Amino acid sequence: MPGSRGQALRRSGGPSRTAGMARTRARAAISAVATPGAARALGTVAVALAFLLALGSAHPALAQTDLGGQRVGTSSGAFLKIPLDARGSAMAGATSAWVSGPTALFWNPAGLGIEEERAVSFSAIDYTAGIPIGAAAICFPARLIRGAVGIGLAGLQAEMAETDEYHPLGTGRDFSYRAWTAALGVSRALTDKLSFGLSFKAFHEDLGTEVGGPALNSWLVDAGAIYFVGYRDARIGIALTNFGPDLRPSGEFTSRRTGAAVRYASFSPPTFFRFGAAIDPYASALWSTRLALEIGHPADNREVLRFGAETTYRRLIALRGGYDFSADALKLHAGFGARVRVGAQVMRVDYSYADGGDFGGIHRWTLQTNW
């Protein structure tokens, strides 16, 4: 009723008083959000949302296993997909958000300058079927670009018997498969929270040239970024690796059906896009814990979901584990790390084991030192 409404307005002081009370409540709400405790809470929410985004994005991808599996075998350069670092492998490769130092050159080049020290690493891998793989990398600060520069090299060589459709048990000749990659990377801190990295790689494959096989030479690019959330060392990382032109072996071969010379076919490189998040949920003078989650989109397979965890005692001994939810083999990963003093130099030794099932276990060792 009009009379009742007028009496209510008079009791409350009229519309101006009501509006003033609303502004006071709004200012109080803004002040509450601006407090340090609320800022930390918002940081927690941001990290939680990143993890939920990763899980939510991966869930429909895992439901489309058959569709993604149709891409298997559609790329070349399989050597480029092998993890080359023991620490990252022990956490199932969920590395894009937290990797740092020279080994970042093999995962996400944005991490090259995070430690702000000169460092060198060497890795030895006992791959499946006893194939040996070696890798080395070095990084050092570059004040001119407000970042770091890294150089890396990795390669493998395997000997095997030549076979064909007429000689399935061997022709009596042996040949070798050799592959190597050399990388030059740079990273730059765009702000105190955001780092960006880029690396260029030369790639070479020798597919049995001693028995008339072809060789392959190409170039590839890696790029990535790492963002520090500002709460419990939480980070978000993205990386695009092995991006470049199609890989085509040089030369020709003679078709046994037509007798004509045929060029080798080209296939795309194993390009891989990954998005990950990492956080240290607990840290004290004695213990610290790190959790990492990553989703990935490979060019030649279904989507990937990986999880890794690390716990460290006094920054001296670390235990690690990881699980690749999308892999058919090499699902379970584990490892450890230790800091060892040799004279005045402190070295970090890392080991990882990957369960390959019928293919056997894969062992990786990495030695890194900073100076």
Image: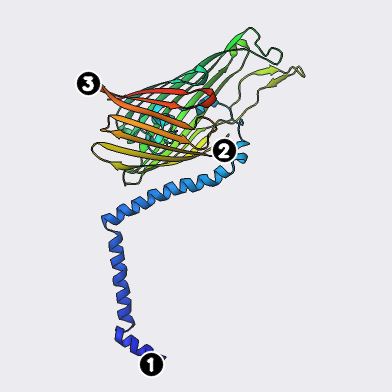
Image quadrant in which the N terminus is located: bottom left
Q: Residues within 10 Å of mark 3 (few under 14, many from 20)?
A: few
| Mark closer to the chain start, 3 or 1 | 1
Q: Residue furthest top?
A: 172
Query: Where does the image place residue 53, in percent across and percent down from the top left?
Result: 46, 48
Q: Which residue is mark 2?
A: 302
Callout 3–callout 1 Cβ contact below 8 Å: no
Query: Where does the image place residue 371, in percent across and percent down from the top left?
Result: 27, 25
- Vertical comparison of 175 with 362: above or below: above
| Mark closer to the chain start, 2 or 1 | 1
The tag on residue 344 is 3
Q: Which type of secondary structure does the marked residue at label 1 adopt?
A: helix
Marks 2 and 1, how far apart at CA: 70 Å
The tag on residue 119 is none
Callout 2–callout 1 Cβ contact below 8 Å: no
Callout 2–callout 3 Cβ contact below 8 Å: no
Q: Which residue is mark 1?
A: 3
Callout 1, which amino acid? Gly
Callout 3, which amino acid? Ala
Q: Which type of secondary structure does the marked residue at label 2 adopt?
A: loop
| Quarter occupied by residue 270 | top right
Callout 2, which amino acid? Arg
The answer to whether residue 185 of the structure is visible from this angle is no
Residue appearing at x 58%, y 11% in the figure: 175
Left or right of residue 316, residue 169 in this image: right
Marks 2 and 3, how far apart at CA: 48 Å
| Quarter occupied by residue 255 | top right
